Image (cartoon, rainbow, N blue to C red):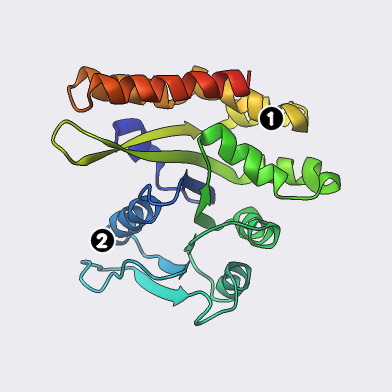
C-alpha cells in the first residue's frame, strides 16, 4: 500500500469499501487489512466477519488483544444482512461483510456505520466512480436521494483494485482510491443525486488516486510495460468520458 492509503485504511467508524471485478484480490486485501489491525498489540477489538465462503482464517495470526469471530454465509446465517444484524447484538468493534450486493445488505451496512461501527465490505465495480453509482442505484428511485446522503455520510474510503501483468511474469495490484474527508463529503452532499457519479469522478481526479496516476507510477518504476500502461490509460479516458 502507498503511504496515504496505509494511513487512511484503518477507520474508527463508518464504511470502507473495497471494490473490483471477480478475481481482483478484494478478499485478499481485506484479509491483509484485518490481519494488520488484529496484530496491533493495542488493538483491543472484537472483530466479526461474515463471508461466503471463508477464504482466509486467522489461526496463525499473532493476536494479543483482539478477538476474531468468523461466520460463513449461508452456513451460519442466511444472508449478509442477517449477519450485520447479528453483529450489532454482539457489540463488535469492527465488522467485515464479505459482499454488499443487494439493497438489504447495503441498508444493514449503512445502519451499522451510522451507529458508530467501522464496517469493511466489498462491491463489484469498474472503478471508484462506478462503485458510488452502483451503491446508490441499488435502491429504488424513490429512495435514492435519502440513501445517497446516508452512503456519502458513512463512506470513509473507496478502493478499487485491479490486477495487471507485471514485467516479472506475475501480477501487480493497481489501486484507485478516494478518501472522503469533510471537504469531499460536503461537495457530494451538495450535488444532485443523478450527478453524484460524475462529481465523484471530478473529485477522484482532483483529490484522489485515479487509476491513471497509479499506472503511470508503476510504468515509470518499470513494474509494468507500455502495453499494459496504454491499456489502463485507454480505460481511464473512457471512464472520464462516461462520467464527464
Q: Quadrant of residue 196?
A: top right
Tag 2: Cα neighbours inside 10 Å, few (<14), some, or many (≥20)?
few
Between 151 and 28, which is closer to the camera in this rendering?
28
> Could you tell whether 14 is left or right of 152 in the image?
left
Q: Position of residue 32 (x, y in %)?
A: 30, 54
Residue extending farthest left: 168
Q: What residue do we see at 64% from left, 43% from top?
A: 134
Dot 1 falls on a residue whose secondary structure is helix
Q: In the rendering, which numbered label is found on residue 39? A: none
- Give the mark nearer the N terminus: 2 vs 1: 2
Of the 4 image quadrants, the one containing the C terminus is top right
- In this rendering, would 207 be left or right of 106? left
Depth check: 122 or 228 in front?
Answer: 228
Write down the residue under mark 1. 196
Q: Is 37 above or below relative to 125?
A: below
Judged from this view, the residue extending furthest toward the right is 142
Q: Is residue 180 visible?
A: no
In the image, what residue occupies the spot 57% across and 40% down? 131
Nearer to me, 2 or 117:
2
Q: CA distance from mark 2 to mark 1?
A: 40 Å
- Side (left or right) of 87 relative to 152: left
For this orientation, the residue located farthest to the bottom is 76
| Residue, far front | 227
Reading the image, the residue beneath label 2 is 41
The percent coordinates of residue 159 (x first, y second) are 45, 40
Placement of the N terminus among the 4 image quadrants: top left
Residue 89 percent location from the top left of the image: 60, 76
Q: Position of residue 14 (x, y in %)?
A: 56, 50
Mark 2 touches mark 1? (CB < 8 Å): no
Amino acid at each position: 500500500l502507498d503511504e496515504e492509503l496505509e494511513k487512511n485504511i484503518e477507520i474508527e467508524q463508518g464504511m470502507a469499501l473495497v471494490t473490483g471485478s471477480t478475481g481482483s484480490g478484494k478478499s485478499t486485501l481485506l484479509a491483509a487489512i484485518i490481519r494488520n489491525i488484529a496484530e496491533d498489540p493495542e488493538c483491543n477489538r472484537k472483530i466479526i466477519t461474515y463471508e461466503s465462503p471463508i477464504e482466509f482464517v486467522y489461526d496463525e495470526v499473532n493476536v494479543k488483544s483482539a478477538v476474531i469471530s468468523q461466520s460463513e454465509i449461508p452456513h451460519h446465517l442466511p444472508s449478509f444482512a442477517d449477519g450485520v444484524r447479528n453483529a450489532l447484538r454482539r457489540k463488535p468493534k469492527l465488522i467485515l461483510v464479505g459482499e454488499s450486493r443487494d439493497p438489504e445488505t447495503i441498508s444493514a451496512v449503512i445502519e451499522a456505520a451510522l451507529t458508530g461501527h467501522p464496517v469493511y465490505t466489498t462491491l463489484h465495480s469498474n472503478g471508484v466512480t462506478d462503485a458510488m453509482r452502483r451503491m446508490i442505484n441499488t435502491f429504488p428511485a424513490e429512495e435514492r436521494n435519502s440513501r445517497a446522503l446516508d452512503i456519502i455520510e458513512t463512506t470513509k474510503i473507496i478502493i478499487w483494485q485491479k490486477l495487471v501483468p507485471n514485467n516479472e511474469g506475475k501480477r501487480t495490484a493497481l489501486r484507485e482510491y478516494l478518501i472522503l474527508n469533510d471537504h469531499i463529503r460536503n461537495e457530494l452532499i451538495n450535488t444532485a443525486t443523478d450527478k453524484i457519479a460524475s462529481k465523484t469522478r471530478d473529485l477522484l481526479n482532483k483529490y484522489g488516486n485515479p487509476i491513471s496516476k497509479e499506472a503511470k507510477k508503476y510504468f515509470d518504476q518499470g513494474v509494468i510495460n507500455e502495453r499494459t500502461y496504454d491499456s489502463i490509460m485507454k480505460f481511464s479516458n473512457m471512464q472520464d468520458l462516461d462520467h464527464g
